[in-house]
Amino acid sequence: MTTPRWTALTLNETLTPLGVKIVVTTDVPCHLWCRITTTPPRTHFHPITVRGVTRMADPYFCFDNYHDNEQEEPGDTLTHTFIKEPWPHCETRYFYFHGTIAAVASPSTSPIFKYHRIQPLLPPTQEYEYGIPFNWVTLFRAASNYGTGNIGVGPGSDFVALSDHPINRIKATFRQNFSRYPPCGLDIRLYKAQDNGNPIPPFLTQAFIPASTIPPYPTPVTIDLDLPLVNVTIGQRYTWLFFAIEEGLPSRQTCVQRGNAVNYTFTPVCNLYGKADLKIEGGGSPVTLYWENWIIS
Amino acid sequence: MAVLDALPEQSIIDGFKGTVDYYVCRGIPCARSWPRRPRLPRAPGVEAGYAAFTYAARAWTSLSPQVQDAYRTMAHGGRMSGRDLFTRSYIKGLFAYPTGP
């Protein structure tokens, strides 16, 4: 009976989100197992005598702490797939293949391969630009401890998604108001919106600009903010809302300056691009605004 | 075959390569005419290995560069070449312990 033998011809490793897919092809149909380890194999040498001279030159290999993984395909095949998950980033593994032909064990083996898994490359960022009108007039009216405070957020901040895409960053240009002390931090939130631009709670993602990052009036500042990633749907209207946050108070409180003309001007840009103004005017100080209590006019 | 008092220098041994073979048999330095044509027919076991050896010799060129490099890496530091290791891996495997499923 002829001893069944095979040889590995090609090897291809592909990154998967959680690990690595290994595909090996062979010269004859066979059924393979992948023997894999994280322990670097060691090479030792046996003595070998060549033309009267003995040298430690005949290698043998120690492959320890391994696991055997059977190929995904049933039966004997020419292409053999192994999916190793999970395989952490920056972990090196060593593996070789052994197998059977027609259910008869073959003495043949592949060489030892080495693979270092790296962080999968993220798809290139695609920038989306939305031409959002700058003007806005809609006011949200809310009750406060000192009467009625008005916080203005208007249709200038809403947009319709041009395609299905993620939002994970907003770039905001703004300046501090000269009369506000202490300065307010700014809370930016994204909502789905009705056709008239009014937001539909709850908010989808959020970013916060602390007051300490805002330079004194009138210097404008542009800040890139990372957002918890959210996916928008093509054709859906969304709107950005902006809240002035008195730092040190509970995050759900929005404080509005007593007196006249407390104005913040925003130019929020994302991979999402848009413009909006925020005006906070009138009312007492402090004015506490709760989202649930808002009356959207 | 001739028994020697001692093996000559390596340069002398190399100089007679293809004509005289120097070796040590049970601790006794020897020399013999070599190579010599083996007697025919060869042993059945030897003849049975011809096909596998021939196939392995030809299959080396069909391996992808990545697989060839893996053999060369394993051969690093020894006297065997990557191609030698490939022939060994095909005929009897590279590992001393069982590799069956």
Image (cartoon, helix red, strand yellow):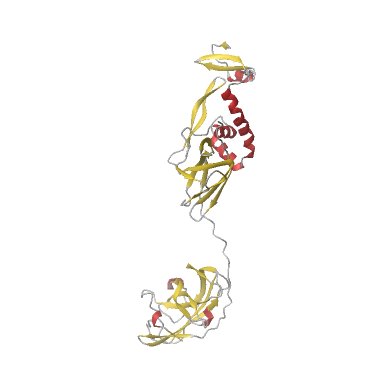
| Front one among A193 and A128 | A193
| Front one among A227 and B61 | B61
- Decide if residue A250 is on the left or right side of residue A170: left
Question: What residue do we see at 54% from left, 77% from top?
Answer: A159
How many tags in the picture?
0
| Front one among A236 and A189 | A236
Q: Is residue A39 above or below residue A296?
A: above
- Decide if residue A103 is on the left or right side of residue B52: left
The quarter holding residue B69 reads top right
Question: What residue do we see at 45% from left, 74% from top?
Answer: A203
- Decide if residue B98 is on the left or right side of residue A234: left
Q: Is residue A234 above or below residue B7?
A: below
Q: From this viewpoint, is residue A213 visible?
A: yes
Q: From this viewpoint, is residue A219 visible?
A: no
Question: What residue do we see at 49% from left, 30% from top?
Answer: A45
Q: Residue furthest bottom?
A: A147
Q: Position of residue A151 (x, y in %)?
A: 45, 83
Q: Position of residue A236 (x, y in %)?
A: 53, 75
| Front one among B1 and A129 | B1
Q: Position of residue B86 (x, y in %)?
A: 57, 35
Q: Position of residue A198 (x, y in %)?
A: 49, 82
Question: What residue do we see at 52% from left, 79% from top?
Answer: A157
User: Looking at the figure, which quarter contains the N terminus of chain A?
Assistant: top right
